[in-house]
Image (cartoon, rainbow, N blue to C red):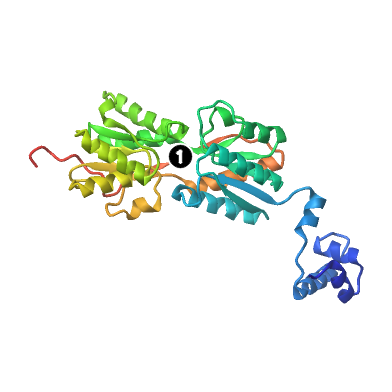
Amino acid sequence: MVRLKDIAQYAKVSVMTVSKALRDEPDVSDATKSRIKALARQMGYVPDSNAQNLRTKTTKLFGLVIPSITNPIFARIVFAIQDRAHELGYDVLIADTHNKPEREEICIRRLLSRRVDGLFISPVYRFEAEARIYQEVLTRKIPTVLLGPPAPFCKSFPSIEIEELVASYNMTKHLLKLGHKRIAYLTGPPVAPWAHDRFEGYRRALREEGLDADDKLVFAAGSTIEDGTKAALQMLNENFHATAIQAVNDMVAVGCAETLMAQGMKIPGDISVAGFGNVLTAEYFRVPLTTVRQPKFRLGIAAADVMMKMIHGEPVRSQRLTAEIIERESTAPPKKHGA
């Protein structure tokens, strides 16, 4: 391993001069800096990050806690955070919680043991009003940004989230404008605030149209393709009468649509299906899915910018980003009777 002492011997200067030159200190001439930096590159010198961290009392590490790296919703968010972190000279350590509170606590503790400079967390939502690990993070004053809406147990942290209610409201309005009056809804995880907001957006749009949400058209789903499949089977078993289905997310919508088509139903000929999220699967599904495009990359960038403000001691506030409807082939006006 090449040391500062080795570079100093070749350059015929002191170790202190080499150290200052590599740190761009002003009391070393530009010519000497250039010569020493070129020599360091030629010799393959790699700075000791641990030594630098001891001097600066930082690690240049961020912790990123998400449900799963395979979750398509988080791919663009992770990319954005890593991209901005790289620009700022930080590395990102990623941990998967699998949506389990006990695993989330372990993940956060491990990141804290690595002395990360800040945490990005997509919370594992729960019904409890308090969570010990979040209280610990708050007590330690670790800069923390939530990726998604806050809940009672994590309300003390700034969050970057989507206007879930408004986006879902707009999707229901889109279906209503197409002429649908009986719109089934597939709900999300009961503990997730974003799922509640999306369901409320659906109900609000119906109320404005003078319609009530029919309990017989609301089916408990979740967040996965398998959840959508189960919900569709339940709908078929109950002989539901709807002309359109609005799902809490794209994966549920895809699972539902696939099951309905396997039973001989045509989309959108027999029934329209809409999702939420605009994951890649939605665009390339065999019937491209009408959905809500979430600004996932923009959310990641916004979260990184808030993080840097916190690190620099600047005031921050939570943000809600707007989303837009993407109309594709899976929705159309309802089939007329006798057609």
Q: Nearer the viewer, residue 116 or 157?
A: 116
In the rendered view, does 299 fall on the left or right side of 145? left
- Badge 1 marks a residue whose secondary structure is loop
In the rendered view, does 159 fall on the left or right side of 181? right
Q: Is residue 258 above or below residue 142?
A: below
State the image coordinates of residue 5 (x, y, percent, origin top left).
87, 69
Q: Is residue 198 above or below residue 339?
A: above
State the image coordinates of residue 233 (x, y, percent, origin top left).
26, 40
Give the amino acid at mark 1: Thr
In the rendered view, does 90 fall on the left or right side of 255? right
Q: Quadrant of residue 333?
A: top left
State the image coordinates of residue 311 (x, y, percent, origin top left).
70, 42
Query: Which residue sits furthest front?
Result: 102
Residue drawn at point x = 28 percent, y = 26 percent? 215
Residue drawn at point x = 33 percent, y = 37 percent? 171
Placement of the N terminus among the 4 image quadrants: bottom right
Residue drawn at point x = 25 percent, y = 44 percent? 331
Q: Quadrant of residue 48?
A: bottom right
* Residue 326, visible in the rendered structure: no
Q: Quadrant of residue 226?
A: top left
In the rendered view, does 88 fall on the left or right side of 324? right
* Residue 104, visible in the rendered structure: yes
Residue drawn at point x = 86 percent, y = 72 percent? 6
Q: Residues within 10 Å of mark 1 (few under 14, many from 20)?
A: some
Total numbered labels:
1
Task: From the image, tell me which residue sits under label 1.
Answer: 322
Placement of the C terminus among the 4 image quadrants: top left
State the image coordinates of residue 204 (x, y, percent, origin top left).
35, 27
